[in-house]
Amino acid sequence: MNEKEARPLSESAPAQDLRLCMVAAERSGDMLAALLLQGMRKSWPQLQAFGIGGPQMDEAGFVSRWSCDELSVRGLVEALWRYRHITGIRQTLIQDVLASPPDLYIGVDASDFNLPVERLLRHKGVPTVQLVCPSIWAWRPERVQKIRESVDHVLCIYPFEPALLAQHGIQGTFVGHPVADVIDMAPDRLKARQALSLPEDATIVALLPGSRPAEIKGLALPFLQAAKHMLTLRPDLQFVLPTHGPLQAMIEAAIVRAGMQGRVHLVMGRSHEVQAACDVALVASGTATLETALHKRPMVIAYKMQWLSWQIANRKRLLPWVGLPNILCNESLVPEFLQEQVQPKALAKAVLQWLDDPAAVAQIQQRFTELHHQLRQDMPTLANHAIQKVLAS
């Protein structure tokens, strides 16, 4: 054991200083981690944080040795295709961390990448915290053993998770979902439209086909084809689609292929403003569905992945839904279209049904408001307290 491992944590993590390794593997994790970093600096003003992150973490003073986009994959087969690349990054990260162990390691979601790192570091004496509980309640429940061996504490973003973890001898704290903290309880649609230079009185549909290349490959074209079909029925509709640099070319190619040039308002980033500005959203399953719900907007959820990945994942699925709004509210609030169900005309019909049923929209807005209150818990502060207890122990 080296000198750093041998000294007490109280010495390795003084009140004003903390050296932290953190790994976020995708853009949604980048956002969660950035909010956590901002909160941690209140307790550790001289916080040094490094590892794998994205632009929002970098803005919070994080030092990214790799971009989170290097790890961003969806589906087991897709992960196998990039296995050597991703495991190479993980092995290099482990070597760097063991050469100069941090005071704390925080894995942000991405349990398949983070749990093996956390297990090794924990056995070397480095405290480990996992932000976002692996969804053992939704699929792959066998991961609970890996969590117990790898993590000192789990920061849970959903209220039912700590009790579930406790049943397996794992400590967890419900910290709320940070997105619920940053999204206004009553988002200003007019202000968002003005900020995006969108017509104030138009009926606007948001197209949110995902933030990973594999998602764009599977969903961008059917989403845009659905939009084109909607236009044949409602020529007054306008469409807005947020994206970011690495995906822009793929999106633009899909727009051309769908024959939607000049009919889609493409926005770089700013997905929250897009969600606030729209009347309804067509959205890929994932964090964006929860963000759309917290903006109190009705939606249609779709998802399509590589066939073999779906077959494997679907066999391990424990719940009848994949969309977070349906899962968290424990009912079929919004329609879901999966795999072969992702057909442009079916998607278009489901989106237009929301526009033709204001009573249903009002009802779902009420349910989403209740969900927002439940998830708004001041995550940075609660997470800070939990992390302090881990370090003190």
Image (cartoon, helix red, strand yellow):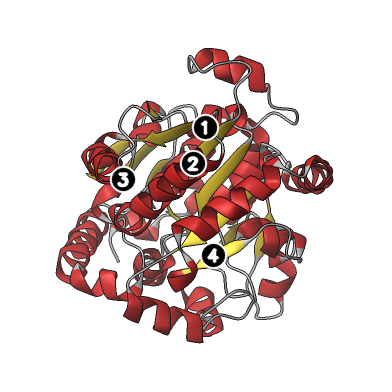
Q: Nearer the viewer, residue 110 or 262?
A: 262
Residue 286 x/y as whole percent: 51, 55
Residues at marks 3 and 2, CA–CA distance in whole angstroms? 14 Å
Residue density around tag 1, few if under 14, some if 14–19, many if 20 or more, within 10 Å: few
Tag in front: 4 or 3:
3
Residue density around tag 4, few if under 14, some if 14–19, many if 20 or more, within 10 Å: many
Q: Give the labeled residue for mark 1.
A: 235
Residues at marks 4 and 3, CA–CA distance in whole angstroms? 20 Å
Residue 285 x/y as whole percent: 51, 57
Residues at marks 1 and 4, CA–CA distance in whole angstroms? 24 Å
Which amino acid is tagged 1?
A: Pro
Disc on the earlier residue, 1 or 3:
1
Q: Quadrant of the C terminus?
A: bottom right
Residue 232 x/y as whole percent: 49, 41
Disc on the earlier residue, 3 or 2:
2
Q: Secondary structure at mark 3?
A: loop
Q: Is residue 211 visible?
A: yes
Q: Is residue 220 left or right of residue 235?
A: left
Q: Give the labeled residue for mark 4.
A: 337
Disc on the earlier residue, 1 or 4:
1
